[in-house]
Image: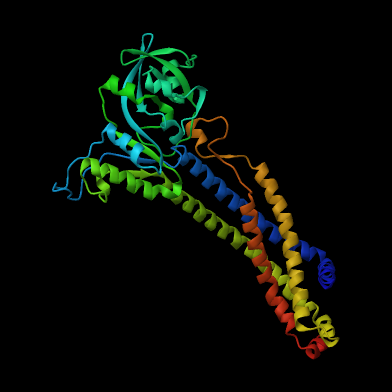
Amino acid sequence: MFLKETISQSWQALMRNRLRSVLTMLGIMWGLVSVVILLAYGQGLGGTVLNAFLSMGNNVLVLWPGQTSLQAGGQRAGKPVNYKYEDVEAIRDEVPIVRGVSAEADRDFGFKLGTRVVSVQVRGVEMPYGAMRRLDVIEGRYFNENDFLEHHRVVILGKDANRKIFQGAPSVGQNVNLGGLDFQVIGILRGKIQDSMYNGPDNENAFIPFQLFRDLKNVRDPDVIVFQPTSPELNKKALAAVREVLARRHHFDPKDEKAAPVWDTIEDRAMINAFSLGLQAVLGLIGAVTLGVGGIGVMNIMLVSVTERTREIGLRKALGAKRRQVLGQFLLEALVLTFTGGLIGIAVAMLLAWAIPPMPLYSEFYKTSNHEGDIFLRVSTSVMLASFVILSLVGMVSGFFPALKAARMDPVEALRYE
């Protein structure tokens, strides 16, 4: 009951000077709009960059052949390490915390269609590769087990590779000559915005079963090994276990990182998340400074209000009002002023976030038509919570010092004030 009465008195006090209160709330409103929009932009930018990076794959690690830098087994450092296909099978059999593993090799091939010959990078891959590397088929199908077991001559084309070879003509189900043999196109990949890659973007590549690749190019062993741990948290443990298998088979020290260099996309994802959070913190700080300027306006108005109501404060204290009650009255007035402006600011910020069009980041480069590579302002729950926390701090700081000044007034001196 006391709180309700105090809030009512605070509102009435503010309404006695409506123009002053409205102008003060405008400062708070604009400050909060800045906080919300900047945080929403930071979150949208971070999310777009992360999605572009994750197009590379779902928590995958890529191992390249390296060169030993440590002595092991009586051998000098500097020995080249070249992977064998049996290494992939050993990892599959001996490392249970690896969910999927695939050999991979790539070369340039000439695709002959009619009288035209088009050069396209072709990757020989195994069945788990598609799920690990996010090869989403938009037309046709992905490989099945029979394609690998029965050595079916099938090929999946990236979006740009398909356009380059068929030039807009229907392709799924059609045959194309590859390395002197006819291959059937069984699928076309969904175009992806890919900010991280090796050996070129997936959009420009073609994919065939690894066993067929070995027959076409007389390549027996993989260029790289791609694997995925059972959970992202096990990336270090899985990498150590895989290196143990490779070290035993190729006679190098398991701690020799240069013998089996790795690209750990899970670590990179953590770095991008840290970048995103850092960006949001910087943008949030800029918005908070703007909101702080509005808070100074609130403090100024409350100090003026305390001065104008000095005799009222003296009378209330003479009639028995305690210091904490006077403190609470003026602090609550500042909070009412702050949060009223803040609620209006949130409404305006959400309206602006809806009205501001997506800002291109990757879409212009990748020529997407669905705004996939654009930055959207994301007014999420976390953005609203952060804005509320900042607003609360500004309101408390802005109101505390004027309220403290009012609470410390001597009632006799206050009553004498003219």
Work out which residue is located at the far top of the displayed protein and give it: 114
Horizontal arrangement in the rendering, residue 149 relative to residue 344 (left or right): left
Horizontal arrangement in the rendering, residue 287 relative to residue 399 (left or right): left
* Residue 122 spot, x, y in % from top left: 35, 25
Horizontal arrangement in the rendering, residue 275 relative to residue 148 (left or right): right
Quadrant in the rendering for residue 112:
top left
Q: Residue at x 20, y 44 (%)?
A: 251
* Residue 23 spot, x, y in % from top left: 75, 62
Is residue 116 placed above or below 310 in the rendered structure?
above
Q: Residue at x 64, y 67 (%)?
A: 393
Q: Is residue 261 visible?
A: no
Q: Residue at x 50, y 30 (%)?
A: 367
Is residue 391 placed above or below 50 in the rendered structure?
below
Horizontal arrangement in the rendering, residue 297 relative to residue 53 (left or right): right
Q: Quadrant of the N terminus?
A: bottom right
Front residue (pair 130, 390): 130
Q: Quadrant of the C terminus?
A: bottom right
Q: Is residue 187 visible?
A: yes
Front residue (pair 272, 409): 272
Is residue 250 placed above or below 336 in the rendered structure?
above
